[in-house]
Each structure stands twice: as C-alpha cells, then as structure tokens.
Image: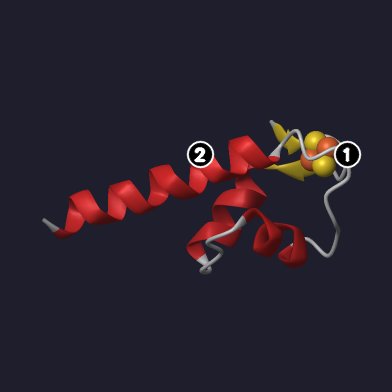
Amino acid sequence: MYICNCNGIREREVRIAIEQGATRPREIFAKSQCAPQCAKCVCDMRRMIQDSQEALRFAAQ
Ligand code: FES
C-alpha cells in the first residue's frame, strides 16, 4: 500500500524509516530521497510515527 502517492513511498518504506530513527515526515522524505509535493500523506506519516512511539513507550513500561 502506498502512503505517498506523489513519490511512490510505500507503507513498508515508511516503517523502515521510522525504525531507523525518523521522527518527522521530512526525515522520511529525505530517506526516500524526495520531497513532499501535495503533502496529503504527511498526516498518515505523523500517525505512523506517533503509533510507533506509543508502542515503544508501552513496551518500556
Ligand atoms: S501524497 Fe505524499 S506528497 Fe502527495
């Protein structure tokens, strides 16, 4: 499934970028060597980052 249709960034690529330390959508774009265009995907990226951070916090408790 594509998260970013403009740049062809898949959900799997976003997850990998987050696992590698991306904490902002701009870092995900940078890892994919592209830039936001319409920015419709930024909310989805932020949600994925937040979900990942919450899962880590929950796991640490
Ligand atoms: S969908 Fe990602 S920049 Fe347009």
| Residue 40, horizontal then vertical, whole percent | 75, 33
Q: Which color mode does the image show?
A: secondary structure
| Up/down of 23 relative to 48, above or below | below
Label annotation for residue 48: none
> Which residue extends farthest left?
61
How far separated are the C-alphas under marks 2 and 1? 18 Å
Q: Position of residue 23 (x, y in %)?
A: 52, 61
Residue 60: percent from left, percent from top? 17, 60
In the displayed structure image, the side of residue 5 where residue 18 appears, left or right:
left
Q: Nearer the viewer, residue 19 or 28?
A: 28
Left or right of residue 54, residue 22 in this image: right
Q: Disc 1 beta carbon < 8 A from ligand 1?
A: yes
Question: Picture coordinates of residue 5 (x, y %)?
Answer: 83, 34
Residue at x 86%, y 45% (from the top left corner): 7
Question: For residue 11, which quarter of the picture?
Answer: top right
Q: Quadrant of ligand 1?
A: top right
Residue on which disc 2 sits: 47
**Image vertical order of residue 5 relative to residue 15, above or below:** above
Name the image quarter holding residue 35. bottom right
- Rate crowding at label 1 as few (under 14), some (14 to 19) or many (20 or more) other CA atoms within 10 Å: some
Amino acid tagged 2: Arg
Q: Amino acid at mark 1?
A: Cys
Label 2: which secondary element: helix
Left/right of residue 32 with respect to residue 18 in the rendered view: right
Taking the spot 69% from the left edge, 31% from the top edge, the residue there is 1
Q: For the residue labelled by badge 1, is the local secondary structure a helix, a strand or a loop?
A: loop
Whether ligand 1 has any atom under 8 Å from the Cβ at mark 2 is answered as: no
**Residue in the image at 10% along x and 56% along y:** 61
Q: Earlier in the sequence, mark 2 or mark 1?
A: 1
Q: Which residue is mark 1?
A: 6
Look at the numbered discs 2 and 1 and tell me whether their residues touch, using CB distance below 8 Å.
no
Q: Residue at coordinates 53% horizontally, 58% vertically from top-left? A: 18
